[in-house]
Image (cartoon, rainbow, N blue to C red):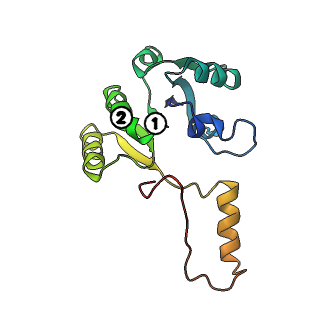
Amino acid sequence: MNKCLLVGLGQMGWRYDAASEGVLTHAKAIKESKKLTLTAAVDPSEQARKEFSQLYPQVEAFASIQEAQAVGPFDWIFLALPTQFHLAAFNKALELKPHVIVCEKPLAPSSLEAEDMAARARAQDCLLLVNYIRPHEPHCRKMFDFIKQNNWGTVQKIIVRYGKGVAN
C-alpha cells in the first residue's frame, strides 16, 4: 500500500465531496483506491484540520509538511493548494523523496517556474503529475456522454468559461 500525504485541506483536498457519494477530491480518491492509503494531511489552519479529522479520524493532521514527516516516508504527496503556494510546498515535498507528487492546476504561475519544477522532479526520479480533468466524475461523464450522443447535432466548437483566469 502506497502511503500518501495530502497538503491542503480546502475544496480540492476534501471539502467538495465531504457530503456526497461522488469522488471529487484527493482525500476521497485516495480513500477509494485499493493501492493508496491516506496517512497524513497538512494545513496551517487548526480549524481546517479539526473539520477534516471529523470525517477522516484515522488520518493524522499536521500544521506543516515538516511535522507530517514524523509519520512518513510517503510514496505519494498531493498538493491541493492555491497556485501561489505550490512552489514552496513542492520544494518541501521533494525533500521527502516521494515517488509521485500530484499538484493541482496550474502547476506554477509561470512556464519557467513549471519547467524548473518538472526538471527537479525528474532529476530526483519523482513523477510529477498535474491534476487537470477527471473524466470519471459524474458531471464530466454526463457532459461527455451528452456530447457523444449528438443531441445538438455534430459538435463543431465548445466554449468553456472558467472564473479563475486563463492559467487555470
Question: Image height check: is 84 above or below 67?
Answer: below
Q: From the image, which quarter does the N terminus lie in?
A: top right
The residue at 42%/22% (across/down) is 65
Horizontally, residue 35 falls left or right of residue 90, namely right
Residue for badge 2: 90
Query: Horizontal and vertical percent for residue 129?
Result: 42, 47
Visible residue check, residue 59:
no
Question: Image height check: is 44 above or below 100?
Answer: above
- 1 or 2: tag closer to the N-terminus: 1
The residue at 63%/55% (across/down) is 136
Answer whether labels 1 and 2 touch (C-beta < 8 Å): yes
Horizontally, residue 95 falls left or right of residue 21, namely left
Q: Amino acid at mark 2?
A: Phe
Report the front residue among 96 and 87. 87
Q: Amino acid at mark 1?
A: Leu
| Measured Cα–Cα span from mark 1 to mark 2 | 8 Å
Horizontally, residue 137 falls left or right of residue 99, namely right
The residue at 64%/45% (across/down) is 24
Residue for badge 1: 79
